[in-house]
Image (tube, rainbow, N blue to C red):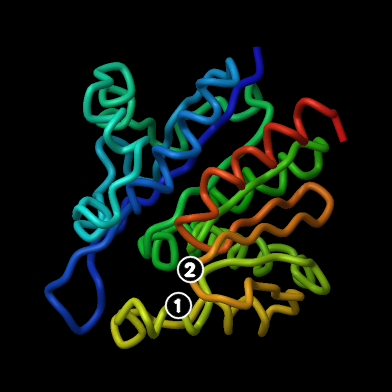
Amino acid sequence: MKKILMILTSHEDMENTDSKTGVWLGEFTDPYYEFIDAGYEVTLASPKGGRPPVDPMSTVTENITAANRRFQDDTVAQQKFNNTLRLEDVRTGEFDALFYPGGHGPIWDLAGSTISAEIILDYLGAGKPVAAVCHGPAAFIKVAELRPGFLQGKKITGFTNTEEVLAFRSDNVPYKLETKLKELGASFHSAVVPFTSHIERDGLLITGQNPLSAGPTAKALIGFLERGA
């Protein structure tokens, strides 16, 4: 049985506002059930452990997905979510792939996490794929710090500057993810129309642009694992 490690944010505070952020719920639930339905085992971890914060906006009616509703009735998944392991307590070598959901939280904590970055480098060095969606690719920022040039020329995607403005969050974040990834040398690609699904793959890296890309990114990771290349 293939095993997936999903690494979630522990950060909930936005800048210059009382608004909260955290995990975008559908970016966790959509991939989670793609993995479960494919027969994979999923383990959840986060920098602080315990229950990650959930972005309140991801639970409003227009943003609720079928996977969100399934999660509400799934006590096993809820138990996992409420008791994520701390990153330093995870035996990362036993997993076949990594997946980073988004929500704005990762641009603060995972972007600066040395433990997370070292896990990513270990997995890539072992030939194991790493997938991230929306703001999840912020985890690559620390990787690029530990290994300069890591993102140079890499084809990736993530939440775009335009989407940040349209989401009315551009004044509440320390930087725009698209801009930061480009500054680090990434070959950033996105859908022509904002908030539509878009995926990029470059070697062992698989990235999705936004919430609608979460399930497709998980499917792409499953396809990679099933093909073995």
What residue would you read off at disc 1? Answer: 163
Dot label at residue 63: none
Looking at the picture, does residue 222 appear above or below residue 138?
above
For the residues carrying marks 2 and 1, which lies nearer the camera in this image? 2
Q: Amino acid at mark 2?
A: Phe
Relative placement, left or right, of 33 versus 96 is left
Looking at the picture, does residue 223 appear above or below residue 112?
above
In-front residue for pair 173/50 = 173
In-front residue for pair 42/30 = 30
Question: x%, y% of residue 222?
Answer: 68, 32
Quarter of image, res 124: top right
Quarter of image, res 149: bottom right
Give the class, few, some or many, for how many residues have Cα within 10 Å of label 2's Cα (few <14, many ≥20).
some
Question: x%, y% of residue 96?
Answer: 68, 27
- Secondary structure at badge 2 equals loop
Q: Residue at x 57, y 78 (%)?
A: 178
Q: Residue furthest right?
A: 229
Q: Amino acid at mark 1?
A: Glu
Q: Residue furthest top?
A: 1
Relative placement, left or right, of 57 versus 209 is left
Q: Residue at x 54, y 54 (%)?
A: 213
Report how far apart the C-alphas of labels 2 and 1 lie in the structure.
7 Å
In-front residue for pair 16/76 = 76
What residue would you read off at disc 2? Answer: 195
Q: Residue at x 83, y 73 (%)?
A: 153
Question: x%, y% of residue 19?
Answer: 16, 71
- Secondary structure at badge 1 equals helix
Quadrant (top left/top right/bottom left/bottom right) for the C terminus: top right
Question: x%, y% of residue 48?
Answer: 32, 44
Q: Residue furthest left?
A: 18
